[in-house]
Image (spheres, rainbow, N blue to C red):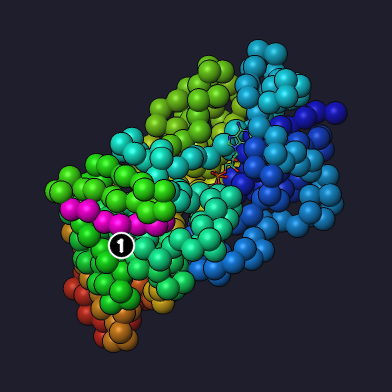
Amino acid sequence: QEVCAIIGASHAGVNCAFALRKEGWKGKIIMYDGDPELPYHRPPLSKAYLSAGDIMGLTPLKSEAAYLKEDIVLRLGTRINAIHPKRKEIILENGDSQAYHKLVIATGARPIIPRIPGIETATHLYPLRTAAHVNCIQEAIKSGAGKEVVIIGGGYIGLETAASLKKLGANVKVLEREERILARVTAPVMSDFFHQLHTENDVEVLTGKNVVSIESNGNQNTVTCEDGSHYIADLIIVGVGIKVNVEMAEKAGIKIKNGILVDNSARTNDKDIYAIGDCTYHFNTYYDRFVRLESVQNAVDQAKIAAAAICGKEAGYNAIPWFWSDQFDVKLQMVGLSEGYDEVIIRKENTDNCFSLWYFIGDDLLSVDAVNNAKAYVWGTKFLKSRVPIDKEKLKDSTVDLKAIPK
Ligand code: FAD
């Protein structure tokens, strides 16, 4: 019986395993993850799961019964230490080996812990990527910490965490190194909107704050910034980005370029090894360039493409990226990639806190950010897919229905 081994059982790996069965893979499927939990949805970690304040049930990606039904073998709490492409086997952390015919690398990413003096000895300092991290945060809060929270990094994870911990009654400060939050991913007007949203909800958002040292006295930390300012924190959350888990693949001779380099079928430079999800650097046909994405959409779509290709059906990855974020009562939905834009059109609807940003390069629509505005997200997606030219004047006028804005 042929074996397809999958390293990493999260959004990418799990979806790939099930898609393999759907595509007709008759052989064995064996999937490994270093973490012990039944694979779960990651986005709620910084949202509902954290703000629940107590360890509530994680939302599993699939039930235990579903793995049994599809005959997918899950080896949880089992890290893979090495890949030997020539021998076509992988080495488990206990030294055992597993032979494969096809291998899927879905190792995702890990949080970056910046080299700040004192960070290693800080009291109650955690990143937020896994259920274990959230459990640590919740345990710290139970032990009396979490009254004074400092969040390092004003990206989506930092801001969602700020909103969730605020709901639990903490005093929360977000320290962002750049001059605005969400600087890497959105236009200044969106940064301003979220800055104000957090301020209105009593979260202190401080920009231009480069943390240079952390000093702990055992119970509390003093966080010091480059400009000399100090902040007291009994809980620190670090949300400054991720590092892709590619070292093992690299050692095995798999090509790396800002992630595991894959073709349009999620195949690496080894024809029997595929890579999917956050750990990949892949070509996006819509934008005509290579990208590395950190999103559920990409993990799921690449998983399906890889499964099809493994079963001999080259489908070709051709997706428009989408992403969402929930903070307080605001739902942000994004479709497309705004990088390289030269114009942003703001369309305000008549309801409070309901608007959308439309990013263009010349006359071409690149992406849409929709705030509490599912309609703009849905129409934006349609227009991006069809590449229909947009009448910008109509777009600006919220009395013109969105479906009437194509030229
Ligand atoms: P990962 O989820 O990183 O999974 C990789 C898995 O591989 C891990 O379980 C890891 O333990 C395992 N692994 C790694 N190396 C090994 C090894 N050597 N042996 C065995 N196992 C290994 N995306 C959105 O689209 N919308 C959101 O709102 C959103 N919110 C998020 C909130 C948080 C707090 C976080 C952390 C992420 C969020 N994301 C969101 C991003 C999304 O969760 C990721 O894009 C997605 O999890 C990527 O899936 P993946 O399977 O590629 O990688």
Q: Is residue 267 above or below residue 40?
A: above
In the displayed structure, does residue 105 sit left or right of residue 113? Answer: right
The structure residue drawn at horizontal position 36% and vertical position 63%, both measured from the top left corner, is 148
Label 1 near ligand 1 (CB < 8 Å): no
Which amino acid type corresponds to the residue marked 1 in the rendered image?
Lys
Give the quarter of the image for residue 117: top left
Q: Position of residue 42 (x, y in %)?
A: 56, 55
Specify the segment rendered in magenta. 229-235
Please name whichever residue, 69 or 174, is drawn nearer the observer in this view of the structure. 174
Q: Position of residue 63 (x, y in %)?
A: 75, 57
Q: Position of residue 275 (x, y in %)?
A: 56, 34
Q: Is residue 34 magenta?
A: no
The structure residue drawn at horizontal position 70% and vertical position 34%, both measured from the top left corner, is 78
In the displayed structure, does residue 189 sit left or right of residue 51? Answer: left
Please name whichever residue, 148 or 371, is drawn nearer the observer in this view of the structure. 148
Residue 17 in view, yes or no: yes
Q: Identify the element where label 1 is drawn.
A: strand
Q: Is residue 329 above or below residue 385?
A: below
Magenta-colored segment: predominant secondary structure: strand
Q: Quadrant of the C terminus?
A: bottom left
| Residue at mark 1 | 173
Q: Position of residue 154 (x, y in %)?
A: 31, 56
